[in-house]
Image: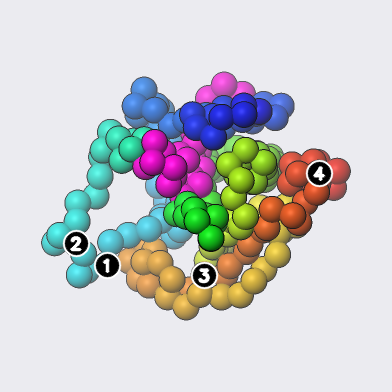
Amino acid sequence: MTASPWPATLAHGEVTLRPLRQLDGRAWREVRARNADWLRPWEATLPPEAESTEDIPTFAMMVRRLRREARQGRTLPFAIVYEGRLVGQLTLGGIAWGSLRAGYIGYWIDREVAGRGIMPTAVALALDHAFDVMGLHRIEINIRPENAASLRVVEKLGLRREGERREYLHIDGAWRDHVVYAVYRDEFAGGVLAAYLSRS
């Protein structure tokens, strides 16, 4: 693990998190297209009132925006690489400093490799980086209650369910409720990854 907050490359076994880059465009679009039906129920969408004023960004626009936010310390956009190929994305976003020192994690993965422990490993790597290198205090993950696969990720990591958020995000064409899982810096003395591996 690097000691620099960003750019950062984090790895354990065959799972690597590295900065998302423009050169990932073709592979990213291929994975997304192949998984469109699987990902659609969990994808953010624009509500009707925003559709006339906000454009859906291209991959290049998205990467430029995320890189700008990374330089400002507000977002860390990671590509998830497994056995040498891009299989998903993890974003540590909404980073706030000052007296809050918090953020959230969002992620998606290629259905072909889901269920192999890749995402729990990736999330654990990102959490350890957020706490140990960045010095953040609290990270949350918000998940639709119907998303059983994503709920398994946080449960495997031993994250604590804190509550619910009604109509939290516009997902798949409607405002959707989410459940909130959170983790604090001092909850895993030896690190989140080490705790996960000890239970696996």
Counting residues from the start of the chain, the first of labels 3 and 2 encountered is 2
Residue 148 sits above or below residue 31 on the image: below
Q: Could you tell me which quadrant the C terminus lies in?
A: top right
* The stretch drawn in magenta includes residue 75: yes
Q: Are marks 3 and 2 in contact (CB under 8 Å)?
A: no
Classify mark 3: helix, strand or loop: strand
Counting residues from the start of the chain, the first of labels 4 and 3 encountered is 3
Most distant residue in the bottom direction: 166
Q: Is residue 143 visible?
A: yes
Counting residues from the start of the chain, the first of labels 1 and 3 encountered is 1
Residue 47 numbered tag: 1
Q: Residue at x 66, y 28 (%)?
A: 1
Most distant residue in the right direction: 198
Q: In whole angstroms, how far apart are the C-alphas of marks 3 and 2?
A: 23 Å
Closer to the eye: label 4 or 3? 4
**Disc 1 residue crowd, few under 14, some 14–19, many 20+, Cα 10 Å:** some
**Residue tagged 3:** 178
Q: Are marks 4 and 2 in contact (CB under 8 Å)?
A: no
- Rendered image quadrant of residue 138: bottom right
Residue 190 numbered tag: 4
Amino acid residing under circle 4: Gly
Amino acid residing under circle 1: Pro
Closer to the eye: label 1 or 4? 4
* The stretch drawn in magenta includes residue 177: no
**Residue tagged 2:** 51
Q: Residue at x 39, y 36 (%)?
A: 71
Amino acid residing under circle 3: His
